[in-house]
Amino acid sequence: MVPVCIQTRGLTKRYGDFVAVDKLDLDVYGGEIFGFLGPNGAGKTTTIRMLCGMLLPTSGSARVVGYDVQREPRQVKRRIAYVPDQPTLYPKLNAWEFLDLIGDLWQMDRREAQQRSQALLELFELTDAANDRLEGYSHGMKQKIALAGALLHRPEVIFLDEPMVGLDPKSARLLKEVMRRLAKEGVAVFFSTHILEVAEQLCHRVGILKAGHLIACGTLEELRRTRGQAEESLEDLFLELTGSSEERDIIAALKGSSQP
C-alpha cells in the first residue's frame, strides 16, 4: 500500500477577515509528483509554509510522513526539504563549504555527507564550479546548489515553490529528471508552478487552488472526465476553472472561432 506522506484536514489560514487558505483537505502519496497550481495569490505558498511548519494555521490539521506538523515539528522537519522560489544562500561560501554546513546542521556523518555532496554536485553538473563562491553563480546554478543542499539528508518529502522560474532549458530538463528520479525512489514531490506544460508532462496528479479553495484535484484524465472534455489540455482546464465568467466566455469564443 502506498503511504500517505502529506495529509491535511480543514487546513485554514486567516489574516484578519482575509482567508488565504480555506478548509483544505488533501492527500499526497509517496512516489508521487504532485503539482499545486493556482493564480497568483491563490494560497499556494501559504499552504507550503504551513506544511513545512514555517507558518501556523488558524485551524485544521496537517500531517507529514505521519507526524503532526504543529505538535511534532522536529520530527516533520527532519524528514522534509523545502526550496523556495528565491533560495537564501551564503554568498561568500563555495559549493563544498555550503554543503558541509548543511551536513553539519543535519548532524550527518562526515564521510557520508562528503560522499553524498560529491554525488549531488555531479548530478547537478556543478563539480567544475564547486570551489567558486556562490555569489558568482548564475540564477540557475544557485537553484541547483539549493536543491543539492535540500536533498543532502535524503528527505522523504520535498516541497518546491516555483522551481522552474528563471531556469534555462537544460537546467529545467535536469530538474524534471531529478524530480522523476526522486519519485521512483518513493519521495513525495510537492511543487507549485505556473508552467502548466511542465505540470502536464511531469505530474501524477495536480491540485488547483483558487482564492484559497481547492477547486479540483486528480489526474489529468480525471479532471477531463469531470469537465466532459476528453482532449482538453491542462492549460485549458486551468483557465476555465480559475477564470472569471467573462474570461471563460472569451475562451469559449476563441475556441469556437478556431473551429474549421
Image (tube, helix red, strand yellow):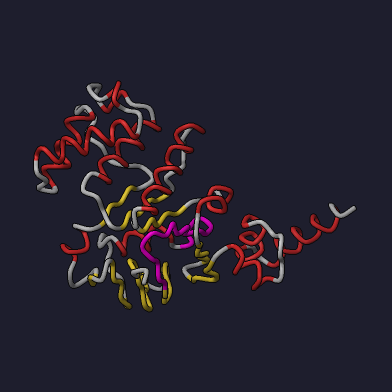
- Magenta-colored span: 26-42
The residue shown at (26%, 53%) is: 155
Residue 39 lies in the magenta stretch:
yes
Residue 169, given in percent of the width and then of the height, sits at 51, 33
Residue 136, given in percent of the width and then of the height, sits at 31, 23
Name the one closer to the observer, 18 or 53: 53
Answer above or below: position of 214 versus 199.
below
Determine which quarter of the picture holds residue 238. Answer: bottom right
Residue 206 lies in the magenta stretch:
no
The residue shown at (47%, 59%) is: 36
Q: How many labels sit on residues?
A: 0
The residue shown at (62%, 57%) is: 234
Q: Is residue 147 left or right of residue 226?
A: left
Determine which quarter of the picture holds residue 133. Answer: top left
The residue shown at (28%, 26%) is: 135
* Quarter of the image where the N terminus is located: bottom left
Residue 19, given in percent of the width and then of the height, sits at 42, 71
Residue 223, given in percent of the width and then of the height, sits at 61, 68
Q: Residue furthest right?
A: 260
